[in-house]
Image (cartoon, helix red, strand yellow):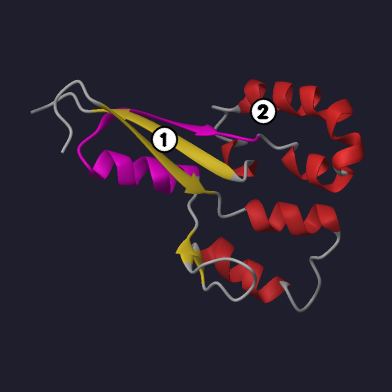
Amino acid sequence: MLRPGGVLAAAGISRYGSTLETGADGTLDADLTPSIEAVIATGRYDGHVGFVSTHWHTADELRAEVQGGGLDEVEVYGIEGPAWPALDVAGVGEFAARVDAALRCARLVERDPLLINASAHLLAIGTKTAG
């Protein structure tokens, strides 16, 4: 229950995160491609490789879910930004040298509708304006 004027934060996993991760780390192969395609098409992940069964969102889908709950003024942000796979691939030894640029990149495009989905995680913020 959220009263008028209340703010809700809802987190989601981007449906494109595994595509970007496996593309960057070199593990996206012919065997993995069908399951990645299914996640992109449906958002459903069956948990068969190292994660629980869950639903992965697009930014538009997360926004619609939050709005469907009676919230207005919904903004969706990309959390990590599009450079996060480069940090993962670079490893611990290169992290410090690259993190500032990756963070700057994330901040530049965190609300860009064309790049929000390139983050691994999404954050929707909505306000309830009606009673």
16 displayed left or right of 4: right
Give the residue pinned by disc 1. 124
Q: Residue furthest right?
A: 93
User: What residue appears at the point 53 percent right and 65 percent down from the top-left corner?
Assistant: 41
What amino acid is found at the position of numbered circle 2 in the picture? Ala
Compared with 5, 63 (above or below) is: below
CA distance for labels 2 and 1:
16 Å
* Mark 2 element type: helix
Task: Report whether 92 appears left or right of 113.
Answer: right
Residue at figure coordinates x 83%, y 56% from the top left: 25
Q: Amino acid at mark 1?
A: Ala
Marks 2 and 1 in Cβ contact (< 8 Å): no
Instruction: Identify the residue position indicated by label 2 in the image.
Output: 106
Stretch in magenta: 59-80
Residue lying at 57% horizontally and 70% vertically, measured from the top left: 38
Location of residue 11 in the rendering, given as x and y in whole percent from the top left corner: 44, 42
In the rendered image, residue 124, in percent from the top left (x then y), is placed at 41, 35
Quadrant containing the C terminus is: top left
Q: Earlier in the sequence, mark 2 or mark 1?
A: 2
